[in-house]
Amino acid sequence: AQSVTQLDSQVPVFEEAPVELRCNYSSSVSVYLFWYVQYPNQGLQLLLKYLSGSTLVKGINGFEAEFNKSQTSFHLRKPSVHISDTAEYFCAVRRGSGYSTLTFGKGTMLLVSP
Amino acid sequence: NAGVTQTPKFRVLKTGQSMTLLCAQDMNHEYMYWYRQDPGMGLRLIHYSVGEGTTAKGEVPDGYNVSRLKKQNFLLGLESAAPSQTSVYFCASSSSGRMNTGELFFGEGSRLTVL
């Protein structure tokens, strides 16, 4: 079975500063990795995904994530955040072959202040 | 393009009452899911379906039942609501087949309060 750990429940940051949201996973098989974003009072939407190939994945709204197999990590980064990036971010993992459901982390609340 | 639609969006129940949440998707997706979201717990899978007429248990299925009589609809039922079922419920769907990468499309959520 796969599992996901998001190391920070809340990350406060000032506008225009860089940010990194950490995600570690555990799995004995190959995996697909995802980051989802949830804006207040909305459902989740896909930010980016890693399936295979280049370990640096670019997503929407200027976010990117790097897959590191040796450290079993998939950290999310943005070089300069905006107030509108305030949201909860979820890392998720699924088995990389056959059918399996997604397992979500507990989420990281990104709080961007002026 | 509606995507995934959940009804109702808000509901207050008394302990012991029953209710059904309806999820409808217009993307012709094979797979559908019900999650619950609680503070500090992330999203936990309640039940899911890999096709019309099929259902399977997720991580936290107790106290819930589901049905998938039509491909586009996935119903979540609470037979006897308990305060522990106070939560925000999300429905999601995904495509199947060789190109299935597991990306989920979510509804906007249904906030349920059990008194």
Image (cartoon, rainbow, N blue to C red):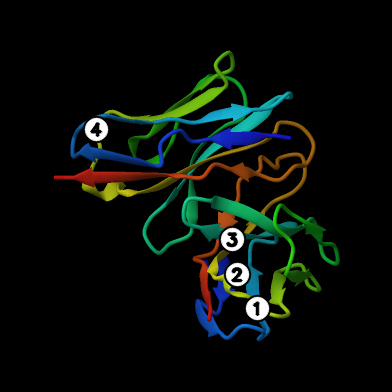
**Element marked by disc 2:** helix
Query: Disc 1 designates what residue?
Result: B81
**Residue A98 or B26: which is nearer the viewer?**
A98
Cα separation, mark 4 vs mark 2, equals 39 Å
Q: Is residue B69 above or below residue A69?
A: below
Query: Disc 3 designates what residue?
Result: B36
The residue under label 2 is which amino acid type?
Answer: Gln
* Chain letter of the residue beneath label 2 in the structure image: B
Cα separation, mark 1 vs mark 3, equals 14 Å
Of marks 3 and 4, the one in the foreground: 3
The label on residue B85 is 2
Q: Earlier in the sequence, mark 1 or mark 3?
A: 3
x, y (%) of residue B64? 73, 69
The residue under label 4 is which amino acid type?
Answer: Ser
Q: Is residue B103 above or below residue B69?
A: above
Cα separation, mark 1 vs mark 4, equals 45 Å
- The residue lying at 75 percent from left, 42 percent from top is A100
| Residue B32 visible in the displayed image | no
- The residue lying at 52 percent from left, 23 percent from top is A73
Q: Quadrant of residue A27?
A: top right
**Element marked by disc 1:** loop
* Chain letter of the residue beneath label 1 in the structure image: B
x, y (%) of residue B30? 75, 57
Of marks 1 and 3, the one in the foreground: 1
- The residue lying at 74 percent from left, 64 percent from top is B62
Q: Would residue B3 appear left or right of A8 to someone viewing this image?
A: right
The residue under label 1 is which amino acid type?
Answer: Ala
Q: Do callouts 1 and 4 point to residues on the same chain?
A: no
Query: Disc 4 designates what residue?
Result: A80
Cα separation, mark 2 vs mark 3, equals 9 Å
The residue under label 3 is which amino acid type?
Answer: Arg
